[in-house]
Amino acid sequence: MVGAATLVAATLVLGACGGGSESGNPAGPGGVPEKLQRFYTQKLTFGPCQSYATTEADAKTFASDAYQCARLEVPLDYDKPAGRTAQIALLRVPVKGEPANRIGSLLVNPGGPGGPGMSHAAFIATKLGDHPVTQRFDLIGFDPRGVAASTPALDCFTDAEREADVMVNSINSGGKDYTEDETRRFYKNCAARSGGEDVLAHAGTRDVVRDMDVLRAVLGDAKLSFLGQSYGTRLGAIYAETFPQNVRALVLDGALDPTLGTTARRLVLFAGFQRAFNNMAAFCAKTPSCPLGTDPTAASAAFQQLVRPLVDQPITTAAGRKVTYTTAIEGVLTGLYSEAGWRAIILGITELKAGRGDTLLFLRDLLSQRRVDASYGNGQESLLAINCLDEERNTPEQETAMTREVFKVAPFLDTGRPVKARDFCEHWPAKPTVGYPYAQNIKGLPKTLVVSVTRDPATPHEGGISLAKTLGASLLTVEGEQHGVALTGGNACVNNIVADYLINLKVPAIDPSCAL
């Protein structure tokens, strides 16, 4: 999955801070062990944000004095709090209303895993402006451990390797298949470039939710208010499982189904992308010039004819960059996250038919956080490393079988070549830590709110229904085709319901609905 802010920003393209304040309070309820007290009682020193920027866009955004930034110290390994530490970068948008009416902090996460939360908080503040939520809460965006401005940062590939499309996944099987030696070297290089094997062993979700609880206490909140989108819904659900007594309010938008294991969930994910591709193709077919033809049922085959030759013969742009099979697939997937991206996909496929690939390359660059100097952010590398601890580990036979099933439910992705896939994480020494199902039978959890869009391509609506049932949450159903909407999509119906819940802890007696 991709962070909601990145996708909304892509859609918009297509269709610094106050100084010197401090905060810090003793931990709230939760029975904090004595060995962790120094982390829970630390003080944050907020200052300008410019030095936290990891992208050109961040450099512009973080120059504003509307934002304040700091670093939170946490144990790298919570079982060894006297050992190495990590520094969690965070951005605060101070409450706009009267201080006396301030409820507390609202932590936000855009998804991924690997999505940067600092820029997401700034994005939400810009989208909302003067809004009941910004009137009552400080918005807090944090880059999870290993991600973006947090340190040590996850780093598994050189920029040259990223530029050469060395980093791919098993849905490219036939286009690129890793050998066992390559997956072994992937782990060794990732450990060496990220600061050690202990960094990789503690990059997963269960460590991040413990960081969130430290942050909650240090910000002075007795209980957590949190908005998690996409993968952020896993963060919220596992926080609820781990610290139910510390939950004030959870808004979980674009849900991962907590009952599905890795293979079952990926099949649901890619079936969702096939539905989105079919819907895009039907929209395209209304125009005689559609590059996929005027018969939507033949669109996947038409697309395959255009992209499969790229496996052996990439297109070279006027700037000398290669448009590979991976480039084209990831460019299309980026546009499929929202109906607003369909026209860009159609333009990209039209160019591809004419032997050009600039638009698909542009879309792919958004997804991969490529900078103008051909360097890359670490979002995609973080996703890989975090998933190595979160997801179930597959043997080569299991990974190959799963990939074949993916191609059955999403034929537009089928390379048309023999499948011989390997799990990127097969040589990861640390075992996965999430476990499936998770967040089951939680005692003492207050009422929560799940938001789910009916035709979400990345986290299908069935996952939202499942998460709401698991948590006993109220379910806000949103009719539309988009990934992520709460406080980011500009929908008044959704935002009013979310605001009423966050501020007043009120959820409708009957599960509500909205439309995009």
Image (spheres, rainbow, N blue to C red):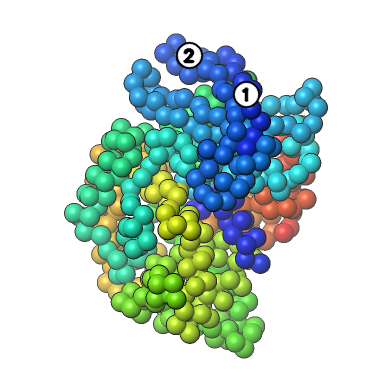
User: Image height check: is 363 above or below 35?
Assistant: below
Q: Estimate the x, y position of residue 514 in percent, counting from the top left.
A: 74, 54
Q: Quadrant of residue 162?
A: bottom left
The amino acid pointed to by label 1 is Gly
The answer to whether the residues at label 1 and label 2 have Cβ atoms under 8 Å apart is no
Q: Secondary structure at mark 1?
A: loop
Res 403 seen here? no
Q: Nearer the viewer, mark 1 or mark 2?
A: 1
Disc 1 to disc 2, C-alpha distance: 24 Å
Q: Which mark is residue 20?
A: 1
Q: Residue at x 44, y 16 (%)?
A: 36
User: Position of 61 compared to 207: left or right?
Assistant: right
Q: Estimate the x, y position of residue 21 in percent, counting from the top left.
A: 64, 23
The amino acid pointed to by label 2 is Gln
Q: Estimate the x, y position of residue 227 in percent, counting from the top left.
A: 62, 39
Query: Circle 2 sits on which residue?
Result: 37
